[in-house]
Image: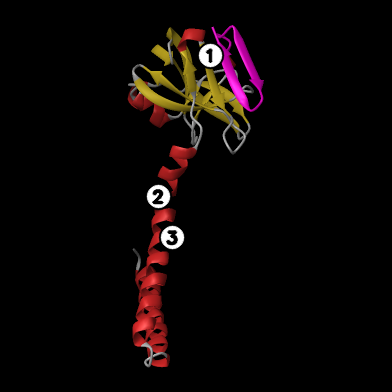
Amino acid sequence: MTAMDYGNLAYLVLLGAAVVFWFFMQNRQGLNRTLQYAAAWGLIFLGVIAAVGLWGDIRQTVQPQQMVLSEAGRIEVPQAPDGHYYLTLDLNGAPVPFVVDTGASGMVLTRRDAERAGLSDADLIYFSEAMTANGLVRTAPVRLDSVSLGPFEDRGVRAFVNEGEMTRSLLGMDYLSRFARLEIAGGRLILER
């Protein structure tokens, strides 16, 4: 925290103490009832703070996840609230989250996800270029030993590591075309082999 943050915190604590003092002075006749109300509001406040702090975990548990129907040779992915489809693939044994991008031709990894898959940043050579919505970026072509999605495993899959900043890796058509069927219908992405 900076000095400005400490100053703001001290101001808010002082202001809160003044409000609490005023509240108790106004209600000193019914102090027992005042303490009950204060305790109830304090618990409500703590509950709101806990819900805000845990929102990421709560959202992950209620958000629909990808479903693998291995006996049917099919994977179904529900549409996320933001309108995108998200898949988690195992790259060289490490789980990596992707956003499905049918407008992208290749599989594009963030540098962080490339490291997770065992690709050292020191070994990457950024000599190719790709045109993105954010303009021209440099990429490093790589081959992934193993790419697994549910029961489906592919070897020697070509991908690119983006030198620029990306929030999430992209799963493009080069990988998606390995499936015999790719369908988006009824708020679901369906992949079959």
Q: Earlier in the sequence, mark 3 or mark 1?
A: 3
Judging from the image, the colouring scheme is secondary structure
Q: Can residue 130 be found in the magenta stretch? A: no
Q: Give the spatial CA distance, label 2 vs label 3.
A: 10 Å
Tell me the CA gap for discs 1 and 2. Answer: 35 Å
Q: Mark 1 sits on what residue?
A: 175
**Residue 80 higher or lower than 51, as above or below:** above
How many numbered marks does the figure carry? 3
Tell me the amino acid under the disc marked 2.
Leu
Q: Does 98 sit left or right of 82 as displayed? A: left
Q: Mark 2 = which residue?
A: 54
Residue 132: horizontal and vertical position, in percent?
Answer: 61, 29
Query: Element type at marker 2?
Result: loop
* Measured Cα–Cα span from mark 3 to mark 1: 43 Å
- Residue drawn at x 39%, y 85% as measured from the top left: 18
User: Of circles 3 and 1, which is in front?
Assistant: 3
Q: Which residues are magenta?
A: 176-193
Q: Is residue 96 visible?
A: yes
Q: Amino acid at mark 1?
A: Tyr
Question: Mark 2 or 3 closer to N-term?
Answer: 3
Tell me what residue is drawn at x 58 percent, y 24 percent: 130
Query: Which amino acid type corresponds to the residue marked 3 in the rendered image?
Result: Val
Image quadrant occupied by the C terminus: top right
Determine crowd level at label 2: few under 14, some 14-19, many 20+ residues with C-alpha closer than 10 A.
few
- Name the residue located 36 percent from the left edge and 77 percent from the top edge: 36
Residue 102 locus on image (x, y percent): 62, 21
- Circle 1 — which element? helix
* Residue at left offset 59%, top offset 16%: 173
The residue wearing badge 3 is 48
